[in-house]
Amino acid sequence: MAADVLVADVEGLTILEDRGARYLIASSQGDSTFAVWRIDGQEPAFVGRFVVAEGAVDRVTGTDGLDALGGPVGDAFPEGLVVVQDDVNDRGTQNFKFIDWREIRAALSPAAAR
């Protein structure tokens, strides 16, 4: 299945726990997307893919890594935070983008709600 959803290179993997569920998130550098599997069952279940589109700075492209934390992270991220490294930018050097897990979960729903 990974061949269908990941484009070389896979530059980062992280696990996020959310409401008793565990998710594996992988960066797919070749197409600047992120693939998500639910990993708390008998077998990993592919949940979907997401992109980090235009935001306050720019979209995420050429990611080299990511990390995540489920649960409250300060007031800004009450249910979790995903941090991704963004390699290519319109202005300046690489940077990091902070994404609210609720936004990712909503984009993946209903698969993420199972």
Image (tube, helix red, strand yellow):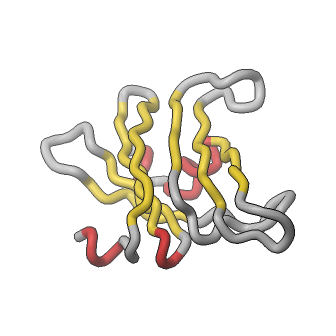
Please provide percent x and percent y for residue 86.
65, 60
In the displayed structure image, the side of residue 46 where residue 105 appears, left or right? right
Q: Name the residue furthest left.
A: 42
Position of residue 90 in the picture relative to residue 39 (left or right):
right
Q: What residue appears at the point 30 percent right and 77 percent down from the top-left corner? A: 4
Instruction: Tell me where residue 60 sits by quadrant.
Output: bottom right
On screen, residue 28 above or below 31: above
Frontmost residue, 6 versus 90: 90
Relative image position of residue 78 (x, y in whole percent): 67, 27
Judging depth in this view, the residue of 50 and 86 nearest the camera is: 86
Q: State the residue at coordinates (61%, 42%).
A: 102
> What is the x, y in percent for residue 74?
72, 22
The quadrant in which residue 55 appears is bottom right
Residue at the image position 63 percent from the left and 70 percent from the top? 61
**Is 12 situated left or right of 97 in this image?**
left
Image check: 76 left or right of 2? Answer: right
Please name the residue shown 36% across and 34% down the image.
21
Residue 30 in the image: x percent, y percent?
A: 47, 77
From this view, report whether residue 47 is shown above or below residue 75.
Answer: below
Note whether 56 is above or below 66 in the view shown.
Answer: below
Quarter of the picture containing the C terminus is top left
Q: Quadrant of the N terminus?
A: bottom left
